[in-house]
Image (cartoon, rainbow, N blue to C red):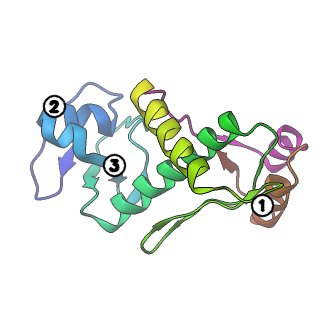
């Protein structure tokens, strides 16, 4: 593995960016958000099977911020779904200065609700449950999400590209 700056480290294949970060130091392991593998941004559990250029990105890097905020939006959605069963999740992208999530709710969230959501997010993070990314062909993704009109709409928008749909 060739790291940014030219340092070369040897690993048994497969190795993940997370394992690479841990081998360098605990500080980097805790700070790394995402990796660039041969120039492509990938999550930290992506197995690397062959020689590759790897750049470990933290919150100080644009791609690191985006990955952190993207993950935070998924954690927020999970917290909202746990606290408010029946809520529909629309979209939750990372944006320039953070992230947001649109929820289809009968009544707007109150400041007290937001405090509960934040507390639930902290509980979820403490549990250390990994977000699992997986890909499905568009037809299978549509079948999986058939009861969620917002996700169906997103899948239909992206399925015309002929690529697998990434889900978390």
Kindly tell me whether residue 39 is visible in this rendering.
no
User: Any magenta on residue 121?
Assistant: no
- Closer to the camera: disc 3 or disc 2? 3
Between 36 and 10, the one nearer to me in the picture: 36
- Closer to the camera: disc 2 or disc 1? 1
Would residue 60 appear left or right of 150 to someone viewing this image? left
Report the Cα–Cα distance between label 3 and label 2.
Answer: 16 Å
- The circle drawn on residue 23 is 2
Which label's residue is closer to the chain start, 3 or 1?
3
Which label's residue is closer to the chain start, 3 or 2?
2
Element class at badge 1: helix
- The circle drawn on residue 154 is 1
Between 104 and 113, the one nearer to me in the picture: 113
The 10 Å Cα crowd at callout 2, few under 14, some 14 to 19, many 20 or more, is few
Which label's residue is closer to the chain start, 2 or 1?
2
User: Any magenta on residue 135?
Assistant: yes
Residue tagged by mark 3? Answer: 33
Instruction: Look at 9% across and 49% down and name the residue there.
Output: 7
Instruction: Look at 67% across and 36% down and name the residue there.
Output: 83
Between 155 and 51, the one nearer to me in the picture: 155
Would residue 48 appear left or right of 136 to someone viewing this image? left
Instruction: Look at 85% across and 47% down and name the residue there.
Output: 148
Q: Residue 28 in the image: state x and y as whole percent.
A: 17, 43
Residue 162 placement: quadrant: bottom right
Does the residue at mark 2 contact the one at mark 1 (Cβ under 8 Å)? no
- In which quadrant is the C terminus drawn? top right
The 10 Å Cα crowd at callout 1, few under 14, some 14 to 19, many 20 or more, is some
Rendered position, 45 above or below 8: above
């Amino acid at each position: 593995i060739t790291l940014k700056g030219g340092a070369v480290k040897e690993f048994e294949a497969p190795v993940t960016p997370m394992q690479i970060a841990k081998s360098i130091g605990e500080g980097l392991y805790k700070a790394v958000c995402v990796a660039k593998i041969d120039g492509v941004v990938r999550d930290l559990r992506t197995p690397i099977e062959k020689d590759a250029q790897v750049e470990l990105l933290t919150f100080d890097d644009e791609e690191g911020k985006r990955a952190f905020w993207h993950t935070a939006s998924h954690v927020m959605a999970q917290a909202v779904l746990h606290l408010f069963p029946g809520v529909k999740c629309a979209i939750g992208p990372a944006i320039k200065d953070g992230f947001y999530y649109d929820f289809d709710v009968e009544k707007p969230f109150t400041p007290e609700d937001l405090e509960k959501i934040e507390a639930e997010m902290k509980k979820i993070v403490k549990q250390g449950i990994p977000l699992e990314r997986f890909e499905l062909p568009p037809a299978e993704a549509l079948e999986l999400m058939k009861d969620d009109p917002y996700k169906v709409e997103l899948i239909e928008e992206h399925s015309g590209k002929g690529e697998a749909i990434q889900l978390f």
